[in-house]
Amino acid sequence: MSSSLVVCEVDESLTAKLKKFRFRKETNNAAILMKIDMEKQLVVLEEEYEARCKPEQQMMYAGSKNRLVQAAELTKVFETRNVDDLTEEWLRNHLAFFR
């Protein structure tokens, strides 16, 4: 088993929410938006999203993404850098491969 760089841990409440999200029974499309709390160096749930990120935040994200995927035991991960791109059509197109 190889180890990967972990810059930020994942907030425990977010991990629980992601696991619940992963096993939800609803069939409608849904998404969880997260952010990195730079002071706590923690990936947390984000209610309001700013599309533009500072380079430091992008680096923290890149160094934390794998840990988040592991902690949430995700099997499908789709990324967008702009919240305006996250539309019903965008999500349907990405999910179409799995149907």
Image (cartoon, grey):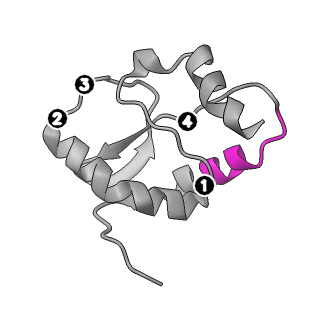
Q: Is residue 4 left or right of residue 39?
A: right
What residue does disc 2 label?
54
Q: Secondary structure at mark 3?
A: loop
Q: Which mark is residue 52?
A: 3
Which numbered disc flags the more N-terminal residue, 2 or 4? 4
Q: Is residue 25 magenta?
A: yes
What residue does disc 1 label?
74
- Residue range corresponding to the magenta coloring: 16-26
Which numbered disc flags the more N-terminal residue, 1 or 3? 3
Q: Residue furthest front?
A: 97
Q: Quadrant of the C terminus?
A: top right
Residue type, mark 1 in image: Leu
Which numbered disc flags the more N-terminal residue, 4 or 3? 4
Q: Is residue 43 left or right of residue 71?
A: left
What residue does disc 4 label?
32
Q: Residue furthest left?
A: 55
Q: Secondary structure at mark 2?
A: loop
Which numbered disc flags the more N-terminal residue, 2 or 1? 2
